[in-house]
Amino acid sequence: MSSFIIEGGHKLQGEIIPQGAKNEVLQILCATLLTDEVVTVHNIPNILDVNNLIQLLRDMGVTVCKLDADTYTFQADKVDLSYLESEEFLTRCSKLRGSVMLVGPLVARYGRALISKPGGDRIGRRRLDTHFLGIHKLGASFTFDANKGIYTLAADKLKGTYMLLDEASVTGTANIVMAAVMAEGTTTIYNAACEPYLQQLCRMLNRMGAKISGIASNLLTIEGVTTLHGCEHTVLPDMIEVGSFIGMAAMTGSEITIKNVSYDNLGIIPDSFRRLGIRLEQRGDDIFVPQQDHYEIESFIDGSIMTIADAPWPGLTPDLLSVMLVVATQAKGSVLIHQKMFESRLFFVDKLIDMGAQIILCDPHRAVVIGHDHNFCLRGGNVTSPDIRAGIALLIAAMSAEGTSRIHNIEQIDRGYQNIEQRLTALGARITRI
């Protein structure tokens, strides 16, 4: 197990470019299974979850070629169907949550998919009902072996239908869309997720020959086609990294420029940071964060305490609440952080409390943060990262703290952030990997 040693109190200065979006690329890589032609994907981040999925595709029989640092080609013309039912495949899927999105393409193209209960972050229950119920409505049979933790879906031919999703799940919508593009007839998906990453998937599928309309809305209409062909696709910048860098600049009182952020696809993220009192400027497609010694949390119009809560797009992504919580510890004022989707994601706040933060954990979903207004700093700590987003929040806290901190289990951070210590060290941070 690797660790970071962080010497706090150093300001950042310069420019940084966000990596390709993790949450998008996991969908895109699974979609390459829908054709036997070459699919070229640009701006793929070099992170653990993505690299594991690429290697899994290789072992499934997909021909993968790395053209340069962030560009790959994929050709699924010789998929080994017997491997897809092997113990090795199922064991590896259990360690990679993104593997669940293999189900839709496999059922659509090969008529059968086995998947083990996937792992990932320890942030509470993350049910898969939406995935499987949606594909079941398209005509697939579905069984679950509770003893082995294995899901099996099979269909001679998927058929289009109307469905109203019980939740606007991003990965669930992606899985159903990838199954429906080759179903017979028309599929209508209401209460579909409409995040930019899902929009990207739909546009890529259309370039491959799919017929999807309603993109960017919560009502998707898909006319099934018999085959799809190759295409070229460029992954968006990672909005979670963009938000993480904004938070780092604010907490450390630094001035940085975040380059090529695809500003139009950030939605409510910039304004959510502004509600915490953080100044930032759009400069073309860049974000400039000036140095601030103080930032003050807004109140609602009636004077009540500000609440920052996650919501389906175009609401605030839940992946940034951990960052916003830690940023609020040095703001002036108080804020209620309401994490609605995952009941264990706020449990990392005890580590921040040990570092000197004033936080009241109300319940598994809500925490009140009382900001220090930089009147005194957090102190260095010895902590363990429980998941990707808590890990980056703890790193931000350590960068702003007095003294030296140590973060263990940084493999969780590596799952979502590419060469993070090298990129931040180039801006002036003091981070050592051991």
Image (cartoon, rainbow, N blue to C red):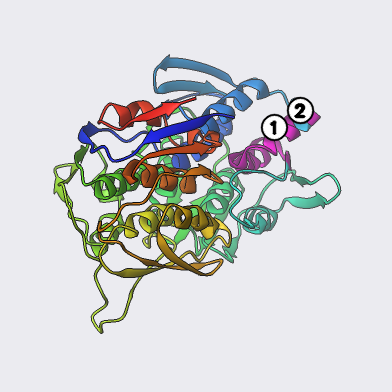
Q: Secondary structure at mark 2?
A: helix
Between 326 and 281, the one lying in front of the other is: 326
Would you say 348 lies left or right of 245 here?
A: right
Q: Position of residue 32 (x, y in %)?
A: 53, 31
Check the picture and name the quadrant holding the N terminus. Answer: top right
Can residue 118 be seen? yes
Residue 97 among magenta residues = yes
Between 100 and 412, the one lying in front of the other is: 412
Q: Which residue is mark 1?
A: 92
The residue lying at 50 percent from left, 66 percent from top is 340
Q: Quadrant of residue 332?
A: bottom left
What's the residue type where badge 1 is placed? Arg
Q: Position of residue 268 (x, y in %)?
A: 30, 59
Would you say 144 lies left or right of 341 here?
A: right
Tag 2 and tag 1, C-beta contact below 8 Å:
yes
Relative to residue 137, is residue 380 depicted above or below?
above
Q: Which residue is mark 2?
A: 88
Q: Secondary structure at mark 1?
A: helix
The residue lying at 46 percent from left, 26 percent from top is 433
Q: Main secondary structure of the magenta part?
A: helix
What's the residue type where badge 2 is placed? Glu
How many residues crowd around disc 2 within 10 Å: few (fewer than 14), some, or many (20 or more)? few
Q: Which residues are magenta?
A: 86-115
Q: Position of residue 280 (x, y in %)?
A: 18, 51
Between 242 and 305, the one lying in front of the other is: 305
Q: CA distance from mark 2 to mark 1?
A: 6 Å
